[in-house]
Image (cartoon, helix red, strand yellow):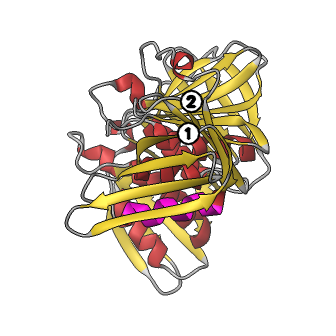
């Protein structure tokens, strides 16, 4: 293998894939990245056996070849080099890296030992705009569980329902559902939340389309020069629609900035009580107030004016509420609930298509 690449391109590709490489894995080679020439380009790949990411970069290839090298060392070294052209040359299992002022050799491991994710053959393919997909991920992935005891809840469920494509995640304490676009085919994919966190980092502000190809075991996301392959989670996703109430007795619409501020201030006094705050909606006073008590520190009540229907109060985790408020786009938020133990719904009056549910705490 002998080729030339620019420092900027190689550094970007390594930073895209290297976080998947894991030195703590039982297979030492999974701490390496695979460098391989493909059609006058250099492919840079890493995998942890569940997720694989490949970034292709333009290069001037003199000799074909492939090698794996330690991901952390390669990434840190290349990012430290000045911008310009880098020469890469493979001599047996030693990778020689040279610029005008730097010359280094990194000991590699044969590419034949590197595990490759099986290719998807005969799968289903469809496209979605990068901006729509990115926004959907930002608004749903935060609600996916990290508890491996219930693997199904660690995933994000991409599925078609009533002619639309939906993305949903829940950890049983909160639930986020986003309607993405019209669905042209019957889709049902349960993608690991960790894979979509990586996908979110990959997606830029490009106007390109994301190409999604899947079979029953795997899904492939392609955008620009980057590919991410992930295993799918097996199992049936819970029928979450039963959780979402059809109507509400208590509803308040208020400024998102005001709601965020009073929640943030109240959360400071809620650290002792694991973030627990009580939200009171008062129809007569036309306001939403949030109260928090810290037995050692004191207590706090913060209020904001709102358009209110009905009166009542409910106790929530302030961190979940702040997480939800941060991913809404509009200036106004509608907060709705029924009883003290019924699900609370956050929506945006100016935009349909996104629902965020938070389950109350027993006060």
Crowd around label 1: few <14 · some 14–19 · many ≥20 (10 Å):
many
Q: Quadrant of residue 5?
A: bottom right
Q: Residue at x 28, y 68 (%)?
A: 298
Element marked by disc 2: strand
Residue lying furthest front in this view? 284
Crowd around label 2: few <14 · some 14–19 · many ≥20 (10 Å):
many
Image marks 1 and 2: residues in contact by CB distance under 8 Å: yes
Whether residue 347 appears in this view of the structure is: yes
Whether residue 58 appears in this view of the structure is: no
Q: Earlier in the sequence, mark 1 or mark 2?
A: 1
Image quarter where the C terminus lies is top left
Is 262 displayed left or right of 247 in the figure?
left
* Residue 140: image tag: 1
Number of numbered markers: 2
Q: Which residues are magenta?
A: 257-267
Residue for badge 2: 168
Is 151 displayed left or right of 320 in the figure?
left
- The image position of residue 314, as x and y in percent, is 44, 40
As rendered, which of 190 and 90 lies closer to the eye?
Answer: 190
User: Taking 248 as reference, is 67 above or below it?
Assistant: below
As rendered, which of 287 and 107 lies closer to the eye?
Answer: 287
- The image position of residue 20, as x and y in percent, is 40, 48
- The image position of residue 169, as x and y in percent, is 51, 32
């Amino acid at each position: 293998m002998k080729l030339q690449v620019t420092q900027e391109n190689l550094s970007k590709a390594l930073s895209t894939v290297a976080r998947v490489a894991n030195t703590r894995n039982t297979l030492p080679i999974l701490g390496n990245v695979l460098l391989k020439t493909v059609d006058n380009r250099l492919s840079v790949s890493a995998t942890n056996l569940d997720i694989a990411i490949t970034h292709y970069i333009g290069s001037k290839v003199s000799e074909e070849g492939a090698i794996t090298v330690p991901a952390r060392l390669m990434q840190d070294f290349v990012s430290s080099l000045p911008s310009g052209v880098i020469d890469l040359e493979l001599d047996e299992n030693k990778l020689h890296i040279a610029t005008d002022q730097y010359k280094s050799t990194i000991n590699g491991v044969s590419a034949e030992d590197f595990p490759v994710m099986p290719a998807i053959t005969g799968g289903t393919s469809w496209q979605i705009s990068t901006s729509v997909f990115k926004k959907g991920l930002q608004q749903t992935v935060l609600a996916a569980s990290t508890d491996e005891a219930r693997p199904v809840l660690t995933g994000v469920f991409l599925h078609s329902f009533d002619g639309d494509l939906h993305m949903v995640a829940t950890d049983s304490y909160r639930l986020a559902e986003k309607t993405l676009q019209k669905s042209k085919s019957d889709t049902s994919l349960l993608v690991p939340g960790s894979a979509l966190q990586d996908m979110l980092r990959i997606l830029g502000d490009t106007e390109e389309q994301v190409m999604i190809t899947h079979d029953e075991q795997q899904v492939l996301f392609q955008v620009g020069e980057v590919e991410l392959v992930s295993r799918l989670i097996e199992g049936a996703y819970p029928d979450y629609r039963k959780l979402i109430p059809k109507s509400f007795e208590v509803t308040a619409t208020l400024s998102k900035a005001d709601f965020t501020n009073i929640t943030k201030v109240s959360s400071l006094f809620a650290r002792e009580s694991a973030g627990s705050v009580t939200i009171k909606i008062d129809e007569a006073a036309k306001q939403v107030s949030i109260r928090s008590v810290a037995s050692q520190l004191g207590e706090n009540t913060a209020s904001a004016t709102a358009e209110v229907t009905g009166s009542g109060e409910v106790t929530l985790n302030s961190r979940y509420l702040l997480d939800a408020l941060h991913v809404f786009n509009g200036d106004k938020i509608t907060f709705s609930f029924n009883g003290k133990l019924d699900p609370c719904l956050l929506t945006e009056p100016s935009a349909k298509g996104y629902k965020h549910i938070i389950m109350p705490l027993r006060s």
